Amino acid sequence: MKRPGIQIGLILTLVLIYSAWVVAPVTAHALLIRSIPEANASLPVSPAQVELFFSEIVEGGISSIKVLDSNAKPVDLGDVKVDPVDPTHMTVSLHSLKDGVYTVSWKAISATDGHLTTGSFPFAIGNVETLFPVQAATQTKSANLSGSALTAKWLFLIALIILVGRLPFKVLIWRPSLQQSEAGPSLPDEPKEWYLLTRLALMILFFSIGLGMLSEAGQIAGSELALPWGPEMGLLLTGTRLGMVWLVRLLLACSIVWLIVSRNATWKKWGVLGLGLALLLSESFTSHAASEPLPFLPVLVDWVHLVAISLWVGGLVYFFAGLRETRQVGWKQRTALTSILIMHFSTLALICVGLLGISGVYSAILRIGSLPALINTPYGQVLLLKLGLAAPLVGLGAVNLLIISPRLRRDRANGASNLQLTTRFGKIVLGEVVLACIVLISASLLSSLPPPQISATTSDLTGSAQVDDLQIDLSISPGRVGVNTFTMWLTSGGQPVQSVKEALLRFTPNQTNLPPSEIQLTGKGNGVFSARGTYLSLADTWQVQSIVRRENKFDAFANFDFNVENPATSKSQPLGTSQVAGGLVVAIGLIFGFGVFSLVRKFAFQTVSGGLLSVALMGLGLVLLFQTQPVSSNLVNPIPPNPQSIAAGKVLFTRRCVDCHGAGGKGDGPEGLTLNPHPADLTQHAVPGVHTDAQLFQFLTDGVPNSRMPSFKSKLSETDRWNLVNFIRTLAPK
């Protein structure tokens, strides 16, 4: 028979081998989304600068861009800057470059989690195709997973689990069990091994913080670890957000030491717990959750996940140490006490498993998003590995609850001892602790891998439309608030359209009451038209209307609807709705209430903490769950002003409006001359800039106050009213 130690070592070895195989070269978190110039571009003249756009905020000062010529000599000015308005945007200026091939090499360190990503790509200036096949070159983006960073994170979590798990286990499990057991008077309120565990946890905590700082500084230096006295360490601690996080962690750890070694007091024990929870929160602040567009709920859920792990696994650690303390009492008392401990701990474990399930599913959907991504990406595969390792852990808990606990409870009721079962249970708890430590390896690895939802992020906005014989393809890059490049491709019958009088884009925000703006595109040849500007000036749903005017052809109109976001919120968040948040808060409130009423015996505490706080949480959740979502006004004209729409609007105008407004819309119709006040002169109201399409549509829908203009909401369909708006626009003076 194999020894348990050999089996445990084999499992740990397999997990580490799999981890190394999965992530050997791995793309880190600050992923390069796009660049100006693009990778492999051939430019006619030298660009003034190189611009890189990343999926996360990058650390200025320690991230870099280098541009090299074909002799590996730098040709940039070295003035690498991170845009203060859009900190995912990094630039470097260039000298005036002559024709040739150049290489951009970059290093980006995420300001959220400190992970390093590097890459390079070529571009060419002038006609150098015969010298170097630029289009055949590839862009590289990679980073090696740091073993020291992974080890530091794993040890950091283990230390916090031990520190956070102690007081809740003592108050909720150990002390109530001793009070119900005959063995209680002969056993200490806090076994000696608990003190040893706490001191071990503190040593692991300081070691993990030190190792993490050296590893993070090593990322800056381009090595596994930096020297403690090296300049990279000073740059990390004094010039980066992550350095501040490490210093705060060190301060919190020193505060825990002071609370433990100073004169004993009850509030200091609770202070240790509070500081431990704060350290867990610092881990959430540097996790994937902190890089979400709306980070509050993801960070909160991640922290709840870590707290639940700490209470469950930390409880198992102190459970095992407490079982060792019970060896000083007789087997009959030991059997009875073990039965009581299982009964109390099972309730805590069920609560923690519930919280882990809710938070884990939320985080997995948020960061993976699809079944193929779960199966085919390193992040998804490691998550499956984590679930595969966690399943036996939950299974052992179920065995304890459903098989061992009833048998020990029966022996306790009969006043009997069960040496074999009690000993076996102690070994099962030890196995759970070891298995939980292995699960934490995969959890640490997940925090070092890019989720598929991040790695798949692209921000460019694209659309296509067919108008008569014309195929219109539109691209807006980077597709965010601010400066964008607008490119339109025009083809007819598969061939580029060469003769175009005018190519325009008209921009109308959906939610904000602003008049439309226009930009004229410049022809680049081969049916390509382009321009650059800040026409998407605010976060909104925008209608971008393309207008193409050709000789001897009707004007071609095509509408494209795009959701434009600020740079800091450019990534998708499929579960950021208040309904999901409400459901989570309701579930957490229910579990919290169940836990308090199950674990706490004092009625006053049950009522104040369990009852009122649980009801408050569920009430907040229900408000979020059923609150009315903001309804989009959708008052952007969805129908292009093409000949068909204008013709349909003219028919409606003749039938419904001519009697009052007259054939030319001047308000001089036969019936209008008898009205007081007279009908409006539509030729003035149709002038662009006087009213938006949305306002004209609203006049037709609701009528005009203090006038004889009626409402057509029940008389004309929405499409008819928009067609009428398009025709009214033609009445404006030319």
Image: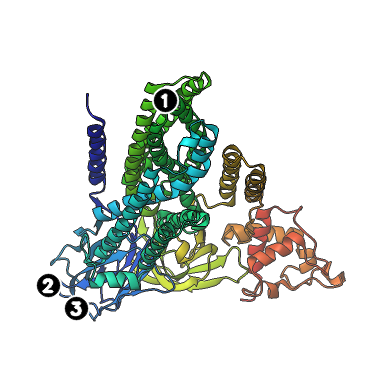
Q: Quadrant of the N terminus?
A: top left
Q: Nearer the viewer, residue 219 or 599?
A: 599
Kind of residue indicated by mark 2? Asn
Q: Position of residue 185 (x, y in %)?
A: 50, 36
Left or right: 217 in relation to 172? left
Quarter of the image for the C terminus: give it: bottom right
**12, above or below 652, in the image:** above
Hey, which quadrant is residue 140 in on the image?
A: bottom left
From the viewer's perspective, tell me whether residue 482 is left or right of residue 98: right
Mark 2 secondary-structure assignment: loop
**Mark 2 touches mark 1? (CB < 8 Å):** no
- In the picture, measured across the screen, residue 285 lies left or right of residue 228, that is right
Look at the image and tell me whether residue 686 can be seen: yes
Q: Which residue is mark 2?
A: 71
Q: Which residue is label 3 attached to?
A: 98
Which of the 4 image quarters holds residue 5?
Answer: top left
Specify few, some or many for label 2: CA neighbours under 10 Å numbering under 14, 14-19, or 20 or more.
Answer: few
Which label belongs to residue 331? 1
